[in-house]
Amino acid sequence: MTALVASLGAALATYLLRILLITLVPASQLPAAVRRLLPHVGPAVLAGLVAAALFRPSGAVQPAFLVGAALTGAVAWWRGSVVLATGVGLSAVAACQLI
């Protein structure tokens, strides 16, 4: 029950911050440099999360996840399809886990 309350509280706080920032600071009011860099924030955060999952502080790299991430990146670059890349990456991780 505590985890559910904590999750709901975090979701509410995130939603409120998002709404407040969108209403108080519209994109048209931001400096040009910030507007130019803003589309890169999402991919940078995602890359940071993936890197943190792949390379743990203990120094243990999980080979299955590393193979999956490499194949996902290669397929996404080669074909440009997020769905195909995700499928290939998940399949590679599952296959490596079975081996």
Image (cartoon, grey):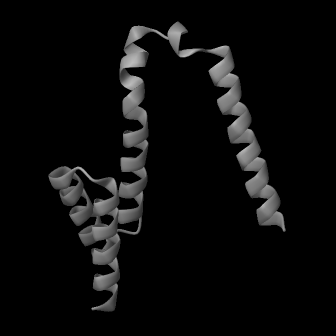
Residue 28 placement (x, y as % from top left): 51, 9
Residue 70 placement (x, y as % from top left): 22, 63
How many discs mark residues in the rendered view?
0
Q: Is residue 93 above or below residue 7?
A: below
- Pick out the residue farthest to the bottom: 99
Residue 79 placement (x, y as % from top left): 18, 54
- Asked whether the viewer can see residue 55, the reply is no
The picture quadrant where one finds residue 22 is top right
- Pick out the residue farthest to the left: 78
- Asked whether the viewer can see residue 95, the reply is yes
Image point (19%, 51%), residue name: 77
The picture quadrant where one finds residue 82 is bottom left
Image point (43%, 39%), residue name: 42
Q: Quadrant of the C terminus?
A: bottom left
Q: Is residue 57 above or below residue 26?
A: below
Left or right of residue 9: residue 21: left
Image point (73%, 56%), residue name: 7
Q: Quadrant of the N terminus?
A: bottom right
Residue 21 placement (x, y as % from top left): 65, 23
Left or right of residue 13: residue 26: left
Image point (38%, 56%), residue name: 50
Of 98 and 84, nearer the camera is 84
